[in-house]
Amino acid sequence: MDDAVEDEFLDANPLAGKKMRRKGDTRPKKDEIDPFSAEECAAIFEVARDQERNFTQFAFWTGLRSSELSALDWGDVDWRGKRIFVQCALTRHSKEPETPKTAAGERYIKLLPPALQALKAQKAHTFMAGEEIFQNPHTGKRWTGDVVIRQRMWKRILLRAGVRYRYPYQMRHTYASVMLQAGESVIWVAQQMGHTDWTFTARTYSRRVSLDASEAVSLAAEKWG
């Protein structure tokens, strides 16, 4: 159900807060959220080349889904406001970019400095055409979804970087974990991620945030003291 909410098939999880017992299987459920460390991200950025580097850096610092990254056009960028408008997604089941399944999916994303840097570097490759931002460098055309990104680029980057393989969606999980770890509001993070319900964001990433009470007090004192 949580996966269905994350993929925008449901607005909210009707089983939130409830526990279910599974007969005959006492093994703990595997935690699918497995973000990359700062060292792993650095290794990825070091070996990624040109458009690969721009794509991965932008993905890590915006938390966008692969389907949303594939659908981005240069006309979606608000350069003065340092933000980008997410209004479409392109999946393996769609031939053309489609509007999000929920109202929360259509949103403005704040472009943090590393994301803005990646976007400016990408201008040298696709800006003059005035259409898609990110292209498959092997075809010179728009990425067509997660499967192609994973097979044609992502696996090769991790192999060159010597980083343990995780699927591309972990870049999104890394973004959320880093933002919450840094003390950003869970409501703001939920809006950036396109989650309909901020409590879903809190439930999903609470175990990945190791911010202790003393650090939390320091952040509050720095901001309000």
Image (spheres, rainbow, N blue to C red):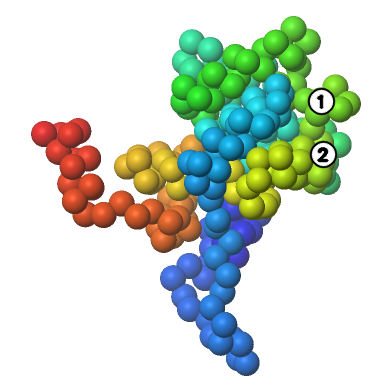
Mark 1, other Cα within 10 Å: few <14 / some 14–19 / many ≥20: some
Q: Quadrant of residue 58?
A: top right
Q: Quadrant of residue 21?
A: bottom right
Which residue appears at 67% of the width and 36% of the height? 68
Where residue 35 sits in the image (x, y, percent)? 53, 50
Q: Regarding mark 1 in the picture, which secondary structure is present there?
A: loop
Q: Quadrant of the N terminus?
A: bottom right
Which residue is the site of mark 1? 137
Quick check: 7 left or right of 187? right
Residue 44 at what x, y percent from top left? 62, 37
Where does the image place residue 126, in percent across and percent down from the top left?
A: 74, 15
Q: Nearer the viewer, residue 67 or 88?
A: 67
Q: Residue 101 appears at what percent x and percent y?
A: 66, 45
Structural crowding at the residue carrying mark 2, measured as other residues with C-alpha within 10 Å and reported as few (<14), some (14–19) or many (≥20): few
Name the kind of residue labelled 1 in the image. Answer: Pro
Q: Who comes first in sequence, dot 2 or dot 1?
A: 1
Q: CA distance from mark 2 to mark 1?
A: 9 Å
> Which quarter shows the C terminus?
top left
SS class, disc 2:
helix
218 left or right of 79 in image:
left
Q: Quadrant of residue 202?
A: bottom left
The residue at the point 22 percent across, 40 percent down is 219
Q: Amino acid at mark 2?
A: Arg
The image's mark for residue 121 is: none
Q: Are marks 2 and 1 in contact (CB under 8 Å)?
A: no
> Can you tell which mark lies on residue 152?
2
Please give left or right for residue 53 compared with residue 150 in the image.
left
